[in-house]
């Protein structure tokens, strides 16, 4: 191929000739994430129906973040990064490690083996960040990431640091136990805020407006922009120390401000979707729900958990399912559905919205706490079941 470096030809060929689980890793990781979400939410539904004697909030949180959401994040990054950079797909061992780790975390959390959960998570985090950095910094990479992608390694670093702090704080105990709480929040919140802000710099403009952000060129303006992103990440980390030691309200409002500035300012989330397809609107709405939930938590700190779950369910989860649907339909050759209004995705979005409302009512209507728990968990399982029933056949019988 005239004008194309030999190294790039070799790497491109390695992507096209790789087996499906390396070439299209989302085909493995997206269904895995759905199954793990059922584990994380299903035991709440089982408890409210009287099928289980107890429920475990910590298991629920860890499985949803380090299981469900992480599986989707890995599937997206393993699929997207090699295509954007023209570098090799993940190796078999990388796919295997990152598929086994969230399952191991979930199983260990069920048996309350908290140290094992974080060991599995740390292994996944190290593999994922090494995978991303090798490809972004490769001499053969045909494209460089946009400035906002600096959030991705920073987000993984937050998760690693948080995991370490949870262990250190728990081991030290006493006056240092607060470090455990900071670490837990970094893992369960900070990491995914960072990932959304990093990936969102590409996903939001591309998936809602059909506009890909410019690559980093190393110019002075790019360096300033990246420094501002790093500074914002530092403030995000500081917000978790602020929450634990000083003020929940100030921490939540600071988080809402950081997310809003990045998404509205640099990603231009204020612009409406201008491409056809109802799923684009779900992605756009989910983007707004991320800062909205933290804003609610800051305005009414007594109900911080309600605001937090507004961000998690209507923000993180809806965004994950919306972006996942866009990837499946786009890569599978179902462009007409991606540009259309499939009723299944509308139903999925409605069920996620119902789950978010019911989860917030668990805090505002505590006299019916367990009733709303059952409604929230049932609606969420319904939403993910609709998502999988609609999209799994498109993963199996692909047009492209």
Image: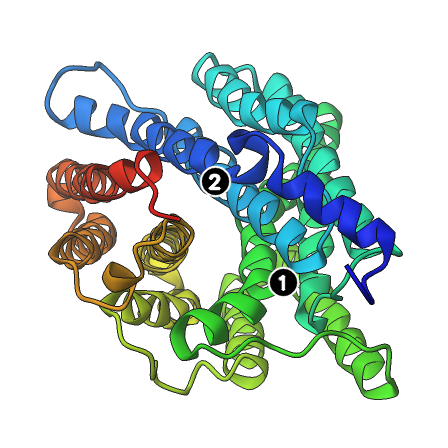
Image-quadrant location for residue 257: bottom right
Closer to the camera, 8 or 310? 8
Give percent across and percent down for residue 148.
67, 70
Residue drawn at 10 percent across, 24 percent down: 49
- Relative depth, front residue between 321 and 343: 343
Q: Give the image location of residue 94, x and y in percent.
A: 68, 29
Rendered-image quadrant of the N terminus = bottom right
Residue 239: numbered disc = 1
Q: Residues within 10 Å of mark 1 (few under 14, many from 20)?
A: many
Q: Going by the image, does 74 lie left or right of 124?
A: left
Compared with residue 358, is residue 292 higher up or lower down, i.e. above or below?
below
Q: Position of residue 332 (x, y in %)?
A: 37, 48
Which percent across, then down, holds residue 53? 22, 14
Relative to 289, does residue 153 appear above or below in the rendering? above
Closer to us: 400 or 188: 400
User: Which badge, 1 or 2, is on the more N-terminal residue?
Assistant: 2
| Residue for badge 2 | 26
User: Going by the picture, which residue comes out furthest to the front?
Assistant: 2
Label annotation for residue 129 = none
Q: Residue at point 64% right, 61% down?
A: 242
Residue 138 appearing in the image: no
């Amino acid at each position: 191929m005239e004008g194309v470096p030999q190294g790039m030809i070799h790497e491109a060929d390695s992507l096209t000739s790789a087996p499906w689980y390396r070439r299209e890793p989302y085909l493995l990781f997206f269904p895995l994430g759905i199954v793990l979400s059922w584990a994380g939410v299903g035991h709440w539904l089982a408890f409210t129906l009287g099928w289980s004697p107890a429920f475990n909030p910590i298991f629920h949180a860890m499985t949803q973040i380090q299981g469900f959401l992480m599986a989707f994040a890995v599937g997206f990054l393993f699929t997207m990064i090699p295509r954007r950079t023209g570098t090799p797909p993940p190796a078999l061992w990388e796919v295997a490690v990152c598929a086994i780790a969230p399952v191991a975390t979930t199983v260990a959390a069920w048996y309350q083996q908290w140290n094992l959960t974080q060991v599995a998570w740390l292994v996944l985090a190290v593999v994922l960040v090494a995978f991303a950095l090798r490809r972004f910094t490769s001499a053969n990479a045909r494209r460089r990431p946009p400035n906002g992608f600096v959030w991705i390694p920073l987000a993984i670093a937050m998760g690693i640091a948080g995991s370490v702090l949870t262990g250190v704080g728990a081991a030290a105990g006493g006056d240092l136990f607060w470090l455990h709480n900071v670490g837990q929040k970094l893992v369960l919140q900070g990491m995914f805020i960072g990932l959304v802000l990093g990936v969102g710099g590409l996903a939001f403009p591309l998936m809602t407006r059909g506009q890909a952000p410019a690559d980093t060129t190393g110019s002075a303006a790019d360096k300033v922009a990246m420094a501002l992103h790093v500074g914002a990440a530092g403030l995000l980390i500081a917000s978790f120390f602020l929450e634990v030691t000083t003020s929940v309200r100030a921490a939540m409002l600071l988080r809402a401000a950081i997310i809003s500035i990045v998404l509205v300012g640099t990603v231009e989330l204020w612009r409406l979707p201008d491409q056809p397809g109802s799923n684009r609107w779900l992605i756009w709405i989910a983007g707004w729900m991320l800062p909205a939930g933290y804003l609610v938590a800051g305005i009414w700190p007594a109900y911080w958990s309600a605001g937090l779950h507004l961000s998690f369910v209507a923000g993180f989860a809806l965004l994950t399912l919306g972006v996942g649907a866009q990837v499946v339909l786009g890569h599978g050759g179902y462009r007409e559905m991606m540009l259309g209004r499939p009723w299944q995705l509308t139903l999925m979005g409605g069920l996620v919205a119902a789950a978010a409302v019911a989860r917030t009512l668990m805090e505002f209507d505590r006299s019916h706490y367990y009733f709303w728990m059952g409604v929230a968990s049932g609606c969420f399982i319904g939403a993910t079941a609709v998502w999988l029933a609609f999209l799994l056949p498109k993963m199996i019988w692909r047009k492209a």
